[in-house]
Image (cartoon, rainbow, N blue to C red):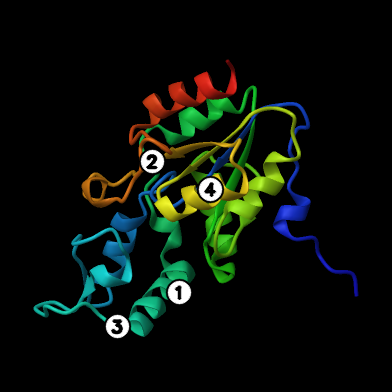
Amino acid sequence: MELRPTDLQACAVHPTAPLVIVDVDEVLAQFMRGFGLFIERHGFELRIDRYALFQNIYRPGETEHVDLILGRGLFDDFFRDGAEDLLPSIGAADALAGLSRRASVVILTNAPEHGRQARVRWLKTHGFDYPLVINSGPKGPSAAELSARTRGPAAFIDDLLPQLESVAQAAPAVGRFQMVADERLRPLAPCDPIRHTRIDDWPALAAALETRLFP
């Protein structure tokens, strides 16, 4: 039986154009708002206490967050039944459309495999019809492999500091930008603006990416 190429193997990158590698949740999509509404329908509530996911899920009236197993179950259910209800980040589609006229754009997400089709449909619906790579774990190795396919400069955008650090280690030549879409999460997000440029507004981020990719 012939094996289907992985997303990473199949992903086409222009060999000379600049490259934009971009995350989805809290970058292109307002994940926490959508996930919060989803769990409310299932009798739970989301409290933005820290920059985390499962530790922010509570049963109404309780002071201890739910355990990891229950949180993971809700997360998996969301990608089966709720992942297409996310709102896009303001300005993201226009920003990537402008960049894509001269650069390759690749979406690199750690969404679960069972949520692939929902994620594909959401991306197309909201104007993000670019090559998709479903990743697992640190994104540095995938970013390194993608950026090695072009002689042009590359940039990586994510909300999570550990993912930015992973790319810094595996592909130090790739420009790194941190973006957090949810205003409630922004003051809670761990960051290192000296190492990774922090811009939480898509028009301003697009301008910074233009400067980085088209000097």
Foreground residue, 169 or 18? 169
Q: CA separation, marks 1 and 4?
A: 19 Å
Residue that label 4 marks: 123
Q: Residue at x 18, y 62 (%)?
A: 49
Dot placed on the residue nearer the N-terminal end, 2 or 3: 3
* Viewer-nearest of discs 3 and 1: 3
Q: Nearer the viewer, mark 1 or mark 2?
A: 2
- Quote the CA–CA distance across marks 3 and 1: 14 Å
What's under tag 4, amino acid-wise? Leu
- CB under 8 Å between discs 4 and 3: no
Q: Which one is closest to the eye, mark 1 or mark 4?
A: 1
Q: Which residue is mark 3?
A: 67
Foreground pick, 137 / 9? 137
Residue at 28%, 58% (x, y): give it. Answer: 51
Q: Give the spatial CA distance, label 4 vs label 3.
A: 31 Å
Between residues 155 and 103, which one lies in front from this camera angle?
A: 155
- In the image, residue 121 above or below residue 155: below
Disc 3 on helix, strand or loop? loop
Judged left or right of residue 42, residue 118 is: right
Task: Tell which circle, 1 or 4, labels the residue nearer the N-terminal end.
Answer: 1
| Mark 1 vs mark 2, CA separation in Å | 24 Å
Residue that badge 1 annotates: 76
